């Protein structure tokens, strides 16, 4: 499901080049949403909570986050809005906000997920500093969500004009992406290549566009209806294959 969410929007993410770094996140904001609960819940879902025997804090935090996490999942699939984001972040009407959960249970797996959700919500609201704050608190050994978190950090830093930090996190997103996971690999590589081109890192852009050409199969692009014309992007940088 997570793969499908990322692939479904890859055309939106990669069909046009950004103009320098200005508004980079705004042009590529939709991919932030694919990190919805299909990825978040990999770290631990309500089903996992019911079936696993964990420490008291884990049980309590998992129970508290479930309504907010379910709403975040719904938004990831149907669309985000400010009211729902505020509810996920701050809670109300029987929902405990992820900010409170992150603060009270930050050392738990649930608290870790709360930071991820908070970061994604803040990024969607263009509150980039808070997005950075929470996403840097998130860490997992699962490659797909970690790559997504690094991409979001890259987006937040790019939007705040901290281009070197953005470049570093985009590279981390590529480095952590499983070579066998074409979806995550493609999204991370294409984001990095586009960013390099947008910020004048021509040599690096060529390297990463070529890497896309070498690693991502035409069948993957065709089957997922992704119109990413890597040869065209290379040609505009003076590389003709």
Image (cartoon, grey):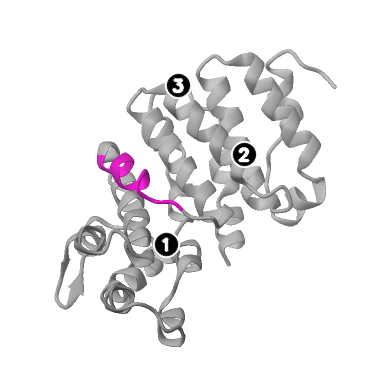
- Label 3 belongs to which residue? 164
Q: Is residue 156 above or below residue 139?
A: above
Q: Secondary structure at mark 3?
A: helix
Residue 131 in picture, x, y percent from top left = 31, 43
Horizontal placement of 175 versus 147: left or right? right
Q: Quadrant of residue 158?
A: top left
For mark 2, what is the residue?
Answer: 175
**Residue picked out by circle 1:** 76
In the rendered structure, which disc, 3 or 2, sits on the residue that comes first in sequence?
3
Q: Nearer the viewer, residue 178 or 189?
A: 178
Relative to 50, residue 110 above or below: above
Give the mark nearest the N terminus, 1 or 2. 1
Find the distance from the CA under tag 1 to the CA under tag 3. 29 Å
Residue contact between numbered discs 3 and 2, judged by CB atoms under 8 Å: no
Residue at 45%, 63% (x, y): give it: 40
The x and y percentages for residue 18 are 50, 27
85 vs 154: above or below: below
């Amino acid at each position: 499901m997570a793969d499908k969410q990322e692939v479904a929007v890859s055309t939106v993410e990669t069909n046009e080049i950004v103009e320098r770094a200005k508004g980079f996140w705004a042009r590529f904001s939709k991919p932030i949403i694919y990190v919805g609960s299909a990825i978040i819940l990999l770290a631990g879902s309500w089903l996992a909570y019911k079936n696993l025997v964990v420490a008291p804090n884990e049980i309590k935090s998992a129970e508290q986050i479930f309504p907010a996490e379910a709403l975040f999942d719904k938004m990831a699939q149907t669309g985000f809005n400010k009211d729902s984001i505020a509810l996920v972040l701050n809670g109300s009407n029987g929902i405990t906000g992820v900010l409170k959960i992150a603060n009270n249970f930050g050392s738990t797996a649930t608290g870790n997920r709360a930071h991820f959700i908070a970061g994604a919500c803040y990024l969607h609201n263009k509150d980039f500093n808070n997005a950075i704050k929470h996403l840097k608190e998130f860490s997992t050994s699962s490659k797909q969500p970690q790559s997504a978190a690094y991409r979001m950090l890259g987006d937040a830093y790019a939007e705040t004009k901290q281009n070197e930090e953005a470049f570093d996190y985009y590279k981390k997103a590529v480095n952590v992406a499983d070579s066998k996971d074409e979806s995550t690999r493609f999204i991370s590589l294409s984001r990095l290549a586009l960013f390099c081109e947008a910020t004048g890192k021509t040599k690096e852009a060529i390297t990463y566009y070529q890497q896309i050409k070498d690693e991502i199969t035409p069948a993957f692009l065709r089957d997922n209806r992704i119109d990413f014309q890597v040869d065209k992007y290379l040609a505009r940088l003076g590389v003709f294959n």
